[in-house]
Image (cartoon, rainbow, N blue to C red):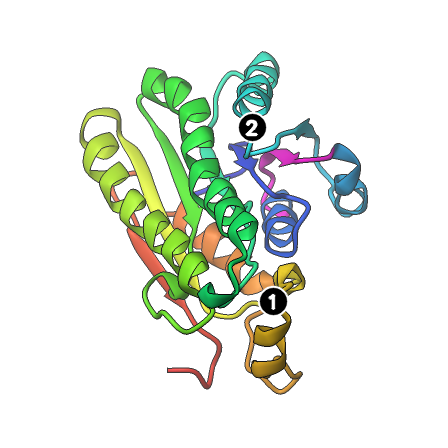
Amino acid sequence: MKINNKVIVITGANGGIGSAIARKLDREGCFLVLTARRKESLTELKKDLKNNHLEVEMDVTNNKSVLDAFTTILNNVETIDVLVNVAGVMPLTYLKNLHLDEWLNTIEVNVKGILRTLHGALPIMKKQKKGHIVNIASVDGKELYKGGAVYGASKAAIIALSRAMRMELSPNFNIKVTSIEPGTVDTSLREDITDTELLNDKDYGGDEPMLDPEDIARAVLYVISEPHQSNINQLTIKPTGKS
């Protein structure tokens, strides 16, 4: 199905995965709504885009910021065809080291952030009786490990939430919901880690198989290009060489 001219909102569009998705969908002729906590962080991405787009400040940890952002969006466009929830953090920590602020912020961004954007996009999608919500989760929501307890729990919540969203929103409102679950992606997310013990224990050398952000962008393009009668519920992507 052709997706040119579709209106697509991307949260965390300034990040590695978010910007790759934006570039890919811009080449497909979509009208992009790029959101980030600070608009100036979108400066480099804008240089690569050829089509008209909208830039909106949105802090997914703040109710008013998300509400104001969707008000701005709907003052500029008549519809939202796709919402891609990318914004996320990954401050891995050992529980014994008591990084409470980081734990809570992980839930605030990764889980509550999606609830806020769902709340912002759902009214127009209900009204138009169509839409597609793509949540970027992680294989870490299924494959837990020491140091990834809170991050893994946040991604497990997204996977479960996506399933429940499909149950409630697809039958009555024709809203598709997809959970994309990547393995390790070559982005700056690990720069969030401040737990020095974990950093000393883990080997984050350059020889680790990783996905490229472009791999996730292609996955998003794939799932939103499916015809109306087809919904890709879940899509797991791992680097070649990892089981």
Residue located farthest toward the top when viewing the structure as drawn: 75
Is residue 127 shown in magenta? no
Measured in 3D between alpha carbons, the distance from the residue under mark 2 to the one under mark 1, in whole angstroms, is: 26 Å
Q: Residue shown at 55%/34% (left/top)? A: 60
Check disc 2 and give the amino acid type: Asn
Q: Nearer the viewer, residue 117 or 126?
A: 117
Q: Alpha-carbon neighbours of circle 2 within 10 Å: few (<14), some, or many (≥20)? A: some
The stretch in magenta equals 27-38
Whether residue 99 is situated above or below residue 164 in the rendered picture: below
Which residue carries the number 1 mark? 195
**Rendering coords of residue 181 (x, y %):** 40, 60
Q: Which residue is mark 2?
A: 62
Residue 130 occupies which quadrant of the picture?
A: top left
Q: Position of residue 94 (x, y in %)?
A: 49, 68
Q: Residue at x 31, y 56 (%)?
A: 234
| Residue 31 magenta-highlighted | yes
**Percent coordinates x, y for residue 194 in the rendering:** 64, 63
Q: Is residue 56 visible?
A: yes
